[in-house]
Amino acid sequence: AAKRAGRNGYAVFDPTMTISVLEEAQLRSDLEQALEHDQFRVLYQPVVDMQTQCVTSVEALVRWQHPKDGLLGPYHFIAAAEANGLIVPLGRWVLREACAQLARWRAESPAAAGLKVNVNLSARQFQYAGLVSDVAEALADAGIDAASLTLEITESMLMEDIDTAKSTLHALRALGVRLAIDDFGTGYSSLSYLKQLPVDVIKIDKTFVDDVHIDADDVALVDAVAGLGQALKMQTVAEGIETDEQWTTLRTIGIDHGQGYLFGRPAAPDEINELLTRVSAISA
Ligand code: C2E
Ligand code: MG
Ligand code: MG
Ligand code: MG
């Protein structure tokens, strides 16, 4: 019926748009409910020292334990939460949960004493005026030192409003937290700009890792980023390492840390506990 109306030129609404507005409203209320009813979970993926394979930190990765659809990854809801603003309370929840979990691991196991945690920030969260105090509060409530927390941001978030981004980064740095650029190489940050930012870690995007063991161009690119990290005194992490060949190539190039299915998938806190003891048993 709507199509017919469209052809006659009398359509006063676009039916597909109406559906998506309804869906958006539904998703928003579902997400609000989910926050209220504790349906979000945080999984943790190990980041390892490239030489020793010891776990040095874990990245917090949010999931939605949906009552009907099961465990949903971020691609199902982060963009919507970003669009409707719920990412701010959701992101705050992830941050607080990750800090609290780090404190629990440390209380449970001496092997977690030096463990750090990485938390992803979204663009909207990064622009939110209460971010710095949220971070300070999460650290204080969990009782962990600021240097144990690394916040991951992307290049596009930095480029949007450079001056504000810079002052936010400096305020976070003043707290003592570490800062990482996520998915590095997929955005447009200039080198001169990067030089001015108080960034501690560069995470090289998986797209440069996928073929690094067979593609000389990727080797050249990753090698350039390793050099950049050295020059700017930033640590490098390669994301999405799945095979021994990739690991060997990246280790030879001199990348400091690695993350990927080869070392461990995103896992529940208990599994990380086991991983920590196992690794410390091996290295002891
Ligand atoms: P990211 O921050 O770059 O996180 C790495 C993603 O790569 C994770 O996907 C992880 O599971 C996946 N990954 C790690 N190693 C491998 C590998 O060896 N092979 C493959 N194929 N994938 C690997 P995930 O958990 O689905 O998260 C996707 C993205 O969603 C994240 O990318 C991040 O941008 C966003 N995200 C996750 N949690 C949060 C959160 O709490 N807040 C915000 N704002 N964004 C989040
Ligand atoms: Mg990340
Ligand atoms: Mg990434
Ligand atoms: Mg990514």
Image (cartoon, rainbow, N blue to C red):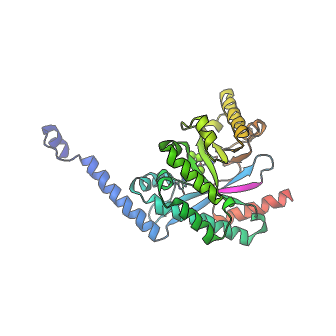
* Residue drawn at x 14%, y 39% as measured from the top left: 9
Residue 246 image point, x, y percent: 71, 39
Q: Nearer the viewer, residue 132 or 268?
A: 132
* Left-right relation of 42 to 103: left
Dominant secondary structure of the magenta stretch?
strand
Residue 195 image point, x, y percent: 63, 39
* Residue drawn at x 50%, y 49% as measured from the top left: 164
- Does residue 173 show up magenta in the picture? no
Is residue 205 at all visible to an observer of this figure?
no
* Residue drawn at x 53%, y 48% as measured from the top left: 165
Residue 153 image point, x, y percent: 56, 49
Residue 29 image point, x, y percent: 37, 64
Q: Nearer the viewer, residue 122 or 214?
A: 122
Number of marks drawn: 0
The quarter of the image holding the C terminus is bottom right
Q: Which residue appears farthest toward the right when viewing the image?
A: 284
* Residue drawn at x 19%, y 46% as measured from the top left: 2
* Left-right relation of 177 to 81: right
* Part of the protein shown in magenta: 54-58
Above or below, comparing residue 102 to residue 152 in the picture: below
Above or below, comparing residue 138 to residue 223 in the picture: below
Above or below, comparing residue 19 to residue 134 in the picture: above
**In terms of image quadrants, where is residue 221?**
top right
Is residue 263 at all visible to an observer of this figure?
yes
Q: Which residue appears farthest toward the top when viewing the image?
A: 216
